[in-house]
Amino acid sequence: MMAAIKSGGGFWEFLRFLGVGGIAALANLVARYLLDFVMPFEVAVVLAYMVGMVVGFFLFQKMLFGGGGIEGKRVVRFIWVNIFGATLAWAVSSIMARLVLPAIGWEWHMFEVAHLFGVGAPAISSYFLHKYYTYA
């Protein structure tokens, strides 16, 4: 399976990546919602991203990019890519929740909407970084 995906894939591979990543993103969003009860929004966003990251690592390896056990190099690369993604998600979530949405008068589930934008922000960069760096 890994050879078929690495040999091309293109648009359909990216759609599969989004689908698998969507499951990890859902874990992220649910974790952030639950963590909001016990900590500030920005801290909850970072910790929830870590939950999604663990779910994503195993799902991407098992369902998309292939590979057997947990390789140290792969784990370290996955973490580096996700540090970048978490920073981007945190920045977008915070800016949306604290500046953009209040500026346009958005009040309906403001933190959930802001976090959804933040979680989606690193999708394209993560795809290419995981394909050509993490799981290469």
Image (cartoon, grey):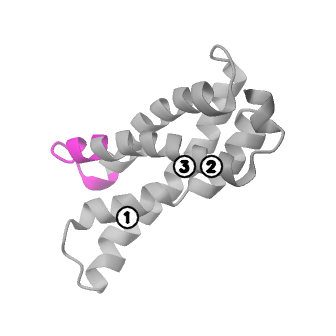
Q: CA distance from mark 3 to mark 2?
A: 10 Å
Give the residue type that dot 1 points to: Ser
Label 2 close to label 1 by CB (< 8 Å): no
**Residue placed under numbered mark 3 in the picture:** 18
Q: Earlier in the sequence, mark 2 or mark 1?
A: 1
Give the residue type that dot 3 points to: Leu
In the displayed orientation, state which residue is furthest to the right.
7
Q: Does residue 32 appear to the left or right of 15 in the view shown?
A: left
Of residues 35 and 60, the one drawn nearer to the viewer in this rendering: 60
| Location of residue 26 with respect to 94 vertically, above or below | above
Q: Which numbered circle lies on residue 55? A: none
- Looking at the rendering, in which quadrant would you find the C terminus? top right
Location of residue 109 (image quadrant): bottom left
The segment highlighted magenta reads 31-42
Q: Which numbered circle lies on residue 126? A: 2
Disc nearest the viewer among 2 and 1: 2
In the displayed orientation, state which residue is furthest to the left.
37
Q: Residue at x 67, y 46 (%)?
A: 13
